[in-house]
């Protein structure tokens, strides 16, 4: 439990709830209730039933043979791409929608970047018949048209965020403003392990199903539940936190988090937060973020909309600062090449986010026979346009 | 004695004006302060802009963005305020988000405030627990008031705690909303204002968010020691003709 949140809502130096008073009652209500609700046997039963019958869990842990041959290690892919709606995001939205119901909320809001979290939220709102409003940056609405259409079909209202850079960061600001203006009946489903306490912990708990299953599956397939390496991509960091969660206290398991270097960490077009960032406060928690000397948040860049975020969750900042996790980065080009490689070697088109994690395999050196688990956080259908342009398909 | 405390002892129906530093033009900060004092403002709240102002509505967001795009920084603001106390005698507060303060350095920030003659701060996303643990000593050492916000949803116990922690005034939000919404004093708002009035807090209260004209100002003054105007003023000075726009705006609040 060394890396988990403490009673004050902190992970070492990071976390807390830096929110204006207008949000205090909402966040406090959550803080007082989230563990009680989640630990309740009835909640657990309903949550796991939906994960099984609706999401399609457990997701397979697949020993990728041709990858393994190429790298000289046993490469396992945790297939979150096979979940309903095509990514890990739905694990969290199922959990939070049930929790919102228990709190008596009638209206759901969420932010989205690529649209994956927006679709996952709109999906569970349709499922539970709750009003749904999704904030999405104007720029992202342009470049992710199919996901916008999916959300609309699911009955959600998609509101363009037109402030700032008009991307994920600004969609998050707009969602927070909505919550300020609707303090009583609305629940805000944050999509990553960011935001004021208890969000980072709550989202991590819902996503921890990824590593919970992985441990069981590894034990069955290899005879040990301890791999040598666990890899995942990090934007805000929700799939990585879910993938790391049950391995954090197994100090012999190396945790590798892959950030988006964009056009290169020194290019000025990057989202490599731990490399470029400093400690500070964004979206309600103290963490590491990309900012100017004056404390203004810097616009990130990544070819992958899901990693295009200037911060990381506070628990990641803690894993980074303590050295428990190794934080590395992969460029746009390296990730796209890795996406094509995965498609050709294993017949799986990965999301460009997930391809960042796969790309890091090229930079690792194996003695032979190590067990390596990679979180394949989402499928690449949404990224076909980008792949088509890059490879002239 | 602290300028804020003195003002509340001497005067009723206090009018506090918020504006964004470095807006509409970078060099306007101090001139606006002077003009506001000349035309009858009682307190000034100078906003230092931040890239992600979650508690603000579109008007203050846009003024913040313009100010930042034109090169405003906290460091530059303190330089602009170097001669503040040669030109302005009313209480001045700085208002902004916590991250620029953290990057500037909390101790250094408090020192700079004291040096130029700033009387207090409003930092909406600085939580009470953090303030108590890490900021309070420093603020008090430099004789700075820290103003907290309360909303219709703030529990009574918490209001008393806030009252105990501050020594300037309490910022009473007319509703839970981002800045720039209109004040509609319906039965529930009225009940909330009366409830706060009857708590007999040790600190004076100022009503903010949604005050835009004489009528809403007077209404607010019947429940509190005064009111704060932000969005309406920022809108009024957008065209940059400061002497005229400040004086025209302030005329609306005179009898």
Image (cartoon, helix red, strand yellow):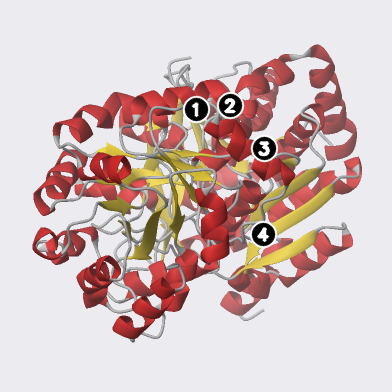
Mark 3: few, some, or many residues within 10 Å (few <14, many ≥20)? few
For the residue carrying disc 2, how many other residues have a C-alpha within 10 Å: few (<14), some (14-19), or many (20+)? few
Q: Which mark is residue B191?
A: 3
Name which quarter of the figure residue B120 lies in.
Answer: top left
Say which element carries label 2: loop
Look at the numbered discs 4 and 1 and tell me whether their residues touch, using CB distance below 8 Å: no
Question: How far apart in space, not on screen, are marks 1 and 3 (Cα)?
Answer: 16 Å
Classify the position of the C terminus of chain B by image quarter: bottom left
A101 up-or-down from A70: above or below: above
State the residue position of label 4: A135
Callout 1 and callout 2 share a chain: yes
Q: Are marks 1 and 2 in contact (CB under 8 Å)?
A: yes
Give the spatial CA distance, label 4 vs label 1: 32 Å
Q: Nearer the viewer, mark 1 or mark 3?
A: 3
Q: Quadrant of residue B133?
A: top left
Where residue A304 appears, as percent x and y from the top left, is 55, 62
């Amino acid at each position: 439990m060394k890396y988990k949140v403490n009673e004050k809502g902190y992970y070492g130096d990071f976390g807390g709830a830096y929110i204006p008073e207008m949000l205090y009652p909402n966040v406090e209500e959550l803080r007082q209730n989230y563990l009680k609700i989640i630990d309740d046997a009835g909640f657990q039963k309903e949550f796991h039933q939906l994960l099984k019958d609706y999401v399609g869990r457990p997701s397979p842990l697949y020993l990728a043979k041709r990858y393994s041959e190429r790298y000289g290690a046993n490469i396992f892919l945790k297939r979150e791409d096979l979940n309903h709606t095509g990514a890990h995001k739905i694990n969290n939205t199922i959990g939070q929608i049930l929790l919102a119901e228990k709190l008596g909320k009638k209206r759901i809001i969420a932010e989205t970047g690529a649209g994956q979290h927006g679709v996952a939220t709109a999906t569970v709102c349709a499922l539970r018949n709750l009003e749904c409003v999704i904030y999405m940056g104007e720029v992202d609405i342009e470049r992710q048209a199919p996901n916008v259409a999916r959300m609309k079909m699911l009955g959600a209202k998609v509101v363009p965020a037109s402030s700032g850079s008009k991307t994920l960061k600004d969609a998050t600001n707009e969602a927070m403003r909505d919550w300020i203006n609707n303090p009583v009946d609305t629940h805000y489903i944050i999509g990553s392990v960011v935001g004021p306490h208890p969000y980072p912990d709550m989202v991590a708990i819902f996503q921890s199903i990824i590593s919970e299953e992985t441990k069981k599956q590894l034990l069955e397939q290899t005879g040990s539940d301890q791999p040598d390496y666990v890899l995942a991509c990090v934007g805000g960091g929700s799939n990585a936190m879910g993938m790391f969660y049950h391995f954090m206290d197994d100090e012999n398991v190396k945790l590798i988090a892959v950030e988006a270097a964009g056009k290169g960490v020194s290019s000025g077009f990057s989202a490599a937060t731990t490399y470029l960032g400093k400690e500070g406060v964004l979206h309600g928690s103290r963490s590491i973020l990309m900012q100017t000397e004056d404390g203004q948040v810097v616009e990130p860049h990544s070819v992958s909309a899901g990693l295009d975020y200037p911060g990381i969750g506070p628990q990641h900042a803690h894993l980074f600062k303590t050295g428990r996790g190794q934080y590395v980065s992969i460029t746009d080009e390296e990730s796209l090449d890795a996406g094509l490689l995965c498609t050709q070697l294993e017949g799986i088109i990965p999301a460009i986010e997930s391809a960042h994690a796969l790309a890091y395999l090229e930079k690792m050196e194996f003695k032979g026979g190590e067990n390596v688990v990679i979180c394949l956080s989402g499928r690449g259908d949404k990224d076909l346009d980008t792949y088509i342009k890059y490879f002239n398909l | 004695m602290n300028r804020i405390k003195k003002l509340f002892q001497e005067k009723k129906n206090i009018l506090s004006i918020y504006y964004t530093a470095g807006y509409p033009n970078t060099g306007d900060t101090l001139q606006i302060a002077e003009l506001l004092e000349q035309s009858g403002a009682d307190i000034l709240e100078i906003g230092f802009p931040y890239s992600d102002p979650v508690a603000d509505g579109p008007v203050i967001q846009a003024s913040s963005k313009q100010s930042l795009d034109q090169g405003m920084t906290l460091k530059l603001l303190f330089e602009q305020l170097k001669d503040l106390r040669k030109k302005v005698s009313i209480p001045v507060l700085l208002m902004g988000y916590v991250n620029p303060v953290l990057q500037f350095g909390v101790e250094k920030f408090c020192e700079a405030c004291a040096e130029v003659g700033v009387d207090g701060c409003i930092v909406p996303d600085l939580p009470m627990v953090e303030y108590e643990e890490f900021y309070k000593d420093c603020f008090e050492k430099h004789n700075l008031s820290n103003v907290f916000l309360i909303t219709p949803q703030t529990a009574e116990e918490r209001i008393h705690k806030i009252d105990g922690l501050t020594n300037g005034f309490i910022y009473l939000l007319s509703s839970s909303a981002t800045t720039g919404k209109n004040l509609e004093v319906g039965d529930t708002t009225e009940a909330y204002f009366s409830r706060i009035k009857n708590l007999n807090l040790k600190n004076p209260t100022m009503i903010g968010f949604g005050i835009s004209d004489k009528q809403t100002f007077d209404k607010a003054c019947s429940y509190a020691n005064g009111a704060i105007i932000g969005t309406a003023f920022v809108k009024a000075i957008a065209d940059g003709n400061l002497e005229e726009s400040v004086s025209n705006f302030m005329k609306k609040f005179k009898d």
